C-alpha cells in the first residue's frame, strides 16, 4: 500500500528454530544440525513528496541485530556455538507505490550488504559475507467495506560469491502471501505463508555437494491489531509459520512479532 506519511518505522522480532539431517553452509557439510535464530530487525522507510511514473517514491534501510545458536556435526566433530552481533544491513534504494481503488501495488529493490562480522575460521557468523539483490513486486487487495485484505509478494534473489569460501548460492525465487479478514476496524485474523525455491545450483570451489538446490514452504495463522495510542495508530502483527517440504534446507518454525507506525 502507498504510505500516507513521510516516515514509517517498523520493528520485527523474529525467532526461528530448525533442524536438518544434511545441509551445506559456507562451504561446510553439516550433519544432524539444529539452528536457533533470534533477530531484531529495525526498518525505516522514507517517502518524500516525489512521484516517478505516477508512483510514490520511497527508500529505506533494515538493520538486524542477531543471536545465533548452532549445534551440528562438522567434519565428524560435534560443534556447539553461539554469537550475538550486528548482521547484514539491507538498503532499499528505491520503492515505488501505486494505488488503483482497492488495489495497491509496489516494486522495490533490496540490497543485502556484507556489513556484519565474518571470520572463516569461526563456526557461525552474523554475516553471510556476500551481496544479495532481491527484487520484489507486491499486490494487495483491500476492501474496507467487507474487511477483506489479500496480498502476495513475488521476489527474485541473486546472490554473489562468498570470496572467503569460494561458494556461491544459486538464484532464488520466493512467494509470500497473506489472507486477512478484519473482524472490526482494528482487528483481523489471517493465514500467511511463503514458498522459496532455488532455481540455479550452487557453484564455486566450495560447492562440494554440487548444485544442492533448496526449497521450502511454510504456512500458519496470524493476527493483526491496530490500536491508537495518544493519537498515533500502531500496527501490531503476530504470526507463526510452520515449514514443510523443505529440501536441502533446514526445516522448522518461524515466529514473528512486528510493530509499525508512521509519522
Image: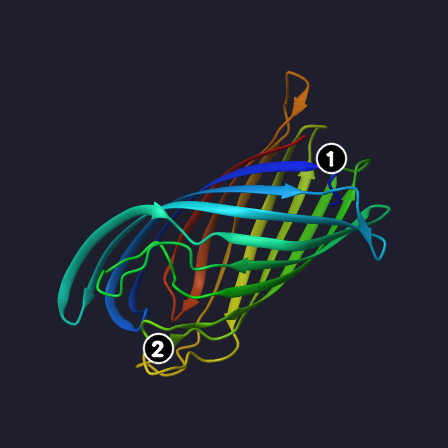
- Residue 195: image location, x then y, percent: 54, 62
The answer to which of 52 and 108 lies nearer the viewer is: 52
- Residue 134: image location, x then y, percent: 57, 63
Name the residue rendered at 44%, 57% in the picture: 243
Q: In which quadrant will I find the N terminus?
A: top right
Q: How many marks?
A: 2
Left or right: 213 as drawn, with respect to 4:
left
- Residue 209: image location, x then y, percent: 32, 81
Name the residue rendered at 27%, 61% in the picture: 119
Dot 2 alpha-carbon crowd within 10 angstroms: few under 14, some 14 to 19, many 20 or more: some
The answer to which of 217 and 156 lies nearer the viewer is: 156
Classify 32 as above or below 183.
Answer: below
Name the residue rendered at 70%, 28% in the picture: 184
Q: CA distance from mark 2 to mark 1?
A: 44 Å
The answer to which of 96 and 106 lies nearer the viewer is: 96
The mark found on residue 5 in the picture is: 1
Left or right: 24 as drawn, with respect to 81:
right
Q: Residue 145: which quarter of the image?
A: top right
The mark found on residue 107 in the picture is: none
Residue farthest along the top direction in this orientation: 230
The answer to which of 240 and 153 lies nearer the viewer is: 153
Classify 239 as above or below 225.
Answer: below
Tags 2 and 1 in contact by the CB under 8 Å rule? no
Left or right: 156 as drawn, with respect to 106:
left
Secondary element type, mark 1? loop
Residue under pointer 2: 166
Amino acid at each position: 500500500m502507498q504510505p500516507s506519511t513521510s516516515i514509517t518505522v517498523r520493528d520485527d522480532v523474529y525467532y526461528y528454530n530448525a533442524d536438518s539431517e544434511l545441509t551445506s553452509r559456507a562451504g561446510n557439510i553439516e550433519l544432524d544440525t539444529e539452528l536457533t535464530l533470534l533477530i531484531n530487525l529495525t526498518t525505516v522507510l522514507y517517502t518524500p513528496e516525489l512521484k516517478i511514473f505516477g508512483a510514490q517514491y520511497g527508500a529505506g534501510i533494515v538493520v538486524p541485530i542477531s543471536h545465533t545458536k548452532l549445534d551440528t556435526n562438522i567434519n565428524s566433530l560435534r560443534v556447539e556455538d553461539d554469537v550475538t552481533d550486528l548482521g547484514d544491513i539491507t538498503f532499499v534504494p528505491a520503492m515505488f507505490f501505486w494505488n488503483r481503488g482497492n488495489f495497491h501495488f509496489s516494486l522495490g529493490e533490496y540490497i543485502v550488504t556484507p556489513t556484519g562480522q565474518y571470520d572463516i575460521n569461526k563456526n557461525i557468523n552474523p554475516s553471510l559475507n556476500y551481496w544479495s539483490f532481491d527484487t520484489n513486486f507486491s499486490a494487495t487487495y483491500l476492501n474496507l467495506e467487507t474487511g477483506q485484505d489479500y496480498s502476495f509478494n513475488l521476489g527474485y534473489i541473486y546472490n554473489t560469491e562468498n570470496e572467503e569460501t569460494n561458494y556461491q548460492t544459486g538464484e532464488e525465487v520466493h512467494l509470500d502471501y497473506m489472507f486477512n479478514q478484519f473482524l472490526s476496524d482494528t482487528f483481523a485474523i489471517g493465514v500467511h505463508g511463503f514458498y522459496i525455491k532455488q532455481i540455479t545450483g550452487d557453484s564455486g570451489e566450495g560447492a562440494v555437494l554440487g548444485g544442492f538446490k533448496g526449497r521450502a514452504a511454510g504456512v500458519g495463522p496470524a493476527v493483526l491489531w491496530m490500536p491508537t495510542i495518544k493519537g498515533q495508530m500502531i500496527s501490531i502483527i503476530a504470526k507463526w509459520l510452520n515449514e514443510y517440504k523443505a529440501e536441502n534446507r533446514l526445516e522448522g518454525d518461524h515466529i514473528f512479532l512486528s510493530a509499525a507506525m508512521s509519522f
